[in-house]
Image: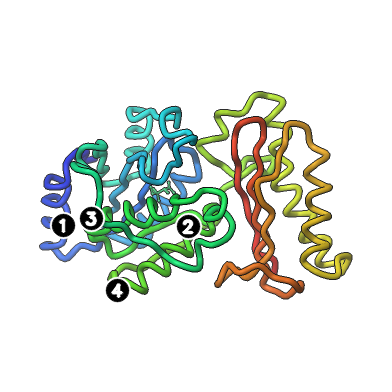
Amino acid sequence: MIVKKTKNNIRKVISEWKKRGLSVGFVPTMGFFHQGHLSLMKESLKRTDKTVVSIFVNPTQFGPNEDFNTYPRDIERDLALAESTGVHAVFVPDVQEMYPSPSKTWVEVEGLTKHLCGRSRPGHFRGVATVVTKLFNIIQPDVAVFGEKDFQQLQVIRQMVRDLDFPIKIVGAPIFREKDGLAMSSRNTYLSDDERKSSLCLFNALKRARELISKNEVKDAAELVSALEDFIGKYPFTRIDYIFVGDPETLEPATHIKRPLLVALAVYVGKTRLIDNMVIH
Ligand code: PAF
């Protein structure tokens, strides 16, 4: 597996592949891999001749009081896992390489970023869209794979690719869960044993939402949100950041229960903010 730290060096590798007519898949990540990341890599490997993974904890998508400094990192372990999955190249730039001087140009996707994480993490999606644009320009992939756990991020990237005419096919890969249902996330490592038990409130609340809808037990979105608030509130150490019920395409909140319906949650368990979602058909 090829490992490159600079834009120039990874570009040389990829342009050699392109000269040979090979297709390139790309999985952007912030590292500290779990099975969810590996499933994105496998998806890319299935679809293209060569797969490139980037590992970069992007400072511009973290707010001033967020966990940029403490975000878990283990490059050696990540490289071993990527190699064992069959990835062809990994791009591991440092902050200086990606942002040699403070950015004066930003990519901002409007509308889709108004609610959910866009509301509680101002500037987050501007940082994501900007770094993904830079990575797309460096790697120039044919296909890029993103996880559906970050549902809003996936929709923002799809919109950005359409609006800015990137010739890249965006693929969404299903949420990868632990045996008990907790969506895999690098941030799960922050949880104490007791918090880990409470973290099940997210997936259990989504299943409860599906049940309430399928049995017609809630008359509208407000009633669904309030039922989920009560449900999550019963778990210790939890504080709801948001419960969103709305349209999976426009990410606008719904008043009525109409399908498909996106139910998305962000909940603090102790100090750890976890997200999860389900599209109910
Ligand atoms: O989903 C992530 O890990 C990040 O937001 C991404 C897409 C790698 C951009 O930094």
Q: Is residue 116 left or right of residue 135?
A: right
In the picture of the structure, the residue carrying the numbered disc 2 is: 153
Q: Is residue 203 left or right of residue 113?
A: right
Give the class, few, some or many, for how many residues have Cα within 10 Å of label 2's Cα (few <14, many ≥20): many
Q: Tell me which label, 2 or 1, sits earlier in the chain.
A: 1
Of residues 198 and 81, the one drawn nearer to the viewer in this rendering:
198
CB under 8 Å between callouts 2 and 1?
no
Q: Tell me which label, 3 or 2, sits earlier in the chain.
A: 3
Distance from disc 3 to disc 2, alpha carbons, whole Å, reads 19 Å
Q: Disc 2, ligand 1: is the CB inside 8 Å?
A: yes
Disc nearest the viewer among 4 and 1: 4
Q: Secondary structure at mark 1?
A: helix
Distance from disc 4 to disc 3, alpha carbons, whole Å, reads 16 Å
Q: Amino acid at mark 2?
A: Gln
In the picture of the structure, the residue carrying the numbered disc 3 is: 139
The colour scheme used to paint the residues is rainbow
Distance from disc 4 to disc 1, alpha carbons, whole Å, reads 23 Å
Distance from disc 1 to disc 3, alpha carbons, whole Å, reads 11 Å
Q: Disc 1, ligand 1: is the CB inside 8 Å?
A: no
Q: Amino acid at mark 3?
A: Ile
Residue drawn at point x = 29 percent, y = 69 percent: 166
Q: Tell me which label, 4 or 1, sits earlier in the chain.
A: 1
CB under 8 Å between callouts 1 and 3?
no
Q: Secondary structure at mark 4?
A: loop
Q: Is residue 278 above or below residue 178?
A: below
Q: Amino acid at mark 1?
A: Trp
Q: Secondary structure at mark 3?
A: helix
Give the class, few, some or many, for how many residues have Cα within 10 Å of label 1's Cα (few <14, many ≥20): some
In the picture of the structure, the residue carrying the numbered disc 4 is: 165
